[in-house]
Image (cartoon, coloured by chain):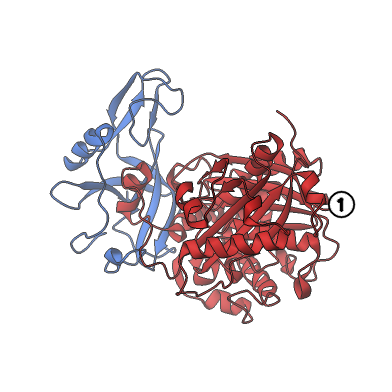
Chain colours: A red, B blue
Amino acid sequence: MTNTSKAAAIVGVAESDEIGLVPHKSALAHHAEAAHNALEDAGLTRNDVDGLLTAGYVNYDLADYLGLAPRYTDTTTVGGASFVIHVGHAVNAIANGLCEVALITHGQAGRSSRVPIPRDPNLPSAMYEMPYGMIGMPINYSMAATRYMHQYGEDRTRQAMAEIAVSTRKWAQLNPKAMMRDPMSFDDYHDSRWICWPFHLLDCCLVTDAGAAIVVTTPERARSLPKPPVWVLGHAEHHDHAGITTMPDLTSTPARVTGPAALGMAGVTHGDIDLTMIYDSFTYTVLVTLESLGYCGPGEGPDFVAGQRTAPGRDFPLNTSGGGLSYTHPGMYGIFPVVEAVRQLRGECGDRQAPDVSLALVNGTGGALSATGTIVLGVE
Amino acid sequence: MTSGAYQGPLPVKQPESDFYWEKAQAHELWLRRCNACEHAYFYPRDFCPDCGSRDVSWVQASGKGTLHTFAIVHRAPVPAFRDHVPFVVAMVDLEEGPRIPTNLVDVEPDPAHIHVGMAVEVAFADLTDEITLPVFRPS
């Protein structure tokens, strides 16, 4: 396999104009605004774009709306992991000359959409899970968390989930774009109502309206643009099941493959990473993903996050935007942690800027802990 | 799913699963089993997901298993389940090997009364004239 480390760079990132509760914008409008804003951030125009990647749409529908006619097209759709995986696909396409400027977009009116997106009832996960009421991600992920509690201890798992909810909110308080900026105490966490035991409300991500976009291009072009290139140093993708009830091990995600693979391509190790962005659909997702990525061993996550270690000012900056838990989460969130990592690497994050960020790891998770994409990003 | 007329999503039967649902209607739990690797599996399809063999048969399960994990649904995921919360979603490790999705019934929906690893046995919930769901209860 060709090592495509540093074969392309991220040169533009942005959200749509307004994120949060935006009832007057469609999902496609979020795509278009984010695309416009990310191209402006890159110093490029729509006419430069010849590659288009998104998830959840047939790509000609999106391209038609945007007024684009790409020569490279990719609609890999594996839930919220998709957009992290798209970064790797964009690198591969650029490295092989299939396109020169790749645009990755996402938009979702998760809160305000006028019609819910249906799930194909012909699929096995629909046939065998949904009649039991296994519908929606809180129910799926909560069953995985119960198993983790059984294997590694209920009280320490509960404490770890609380640590993650509280520290993530502290980051959100520093992000003007975050939806939830009120302080959250440990009591607030423990007192929040049950959604699906073992998940409290404050274990669960938000449901918002939002879009984001990423522009990826060649090394030559990247160096000619006004902002410093953010190099894609490593990328990997993997999935090993669909519905939660066919997950091989409820306490280990496909990140056990993508984490080491992305780090290996980048030629770096966990200790080199200055900033970690993990798709936090639920507090448990963060806990299990830290272990799967290899930051710590199985069952060691509760010790790893203890004492607000992942909060602002501490030694392990994690989900500095405020994450899906407190910043935004329109349904498939995976593009947003990439946007934040790029901004942190450029030093653009103001009050929430983590110190000396030159290497970042982003992990997206999709489906019922089904798919992951991991990328390692760096600046010179 | 222990009370009230069922209004939730029903399985859309597929050709490879008709037999499974017919047997469930007769209050029997049947599994696909691979004749090549001698391994029972769920969900039903006409080849073995482990070794790829197309030499597969059906076997009746004992209906006994252990609770692999569970969760207690408090917020109904769709309106059809509003009258049923709190209820218990679960995965059961069957004696024959496969892990299957289910509901745990005949138990208090309270984590103090439910334990991963507890012994369970199959029961059957007749949702409609056409569809019966295998569910499990403490044994």
The image position of residue A228, as x and y in percent, is 82, 57
Q: Which residue is farthest bottom?
A: A182
Residue A299: tell me if it is visible: no
The subunit carrying tag 1 is A
Q: Nearer the viewer, residue A363 or B90?
A: A363
**In this picture, residue A229 sits left or right of residue B70:** right
Residue designated by label 1 = A380
Q: Nearer the viewer, residue A257 or B5?
A: A257
The image position of residue B28, as x and y in percent, is 22, 38
Above or below: residue A23 compared with residue A48: below
Q: Number of callouts in the render?
A: 1
The image position of residue B64, as x and y in percent, is 33, 40
Few, some or many C-alpha atoms within 10 Å of disc 1 (few <14, some 14-19, many ≥20)? Answer: few
Q: Nearer the viewer, residue A104 or A3?
A: A104
- For label 1, the SS is loop
**In this picture, residue A151 sits left or right of residue A276:** left
The image position of residue A243, as x and y in percent, is 43, 46
Above or below: residue B64 compared with residue A81: above
Looking at numbered disc 1 in the image, what kind of residue is underneath it? Glu
Identify the residue at image location x=33%, y=57%.
A133
Residue A111: tell me if it is visible: yes
Which quarter shows the N terminus of chain B?
bottom left
Identify the residue at image location x=28%, y=58%.
B106
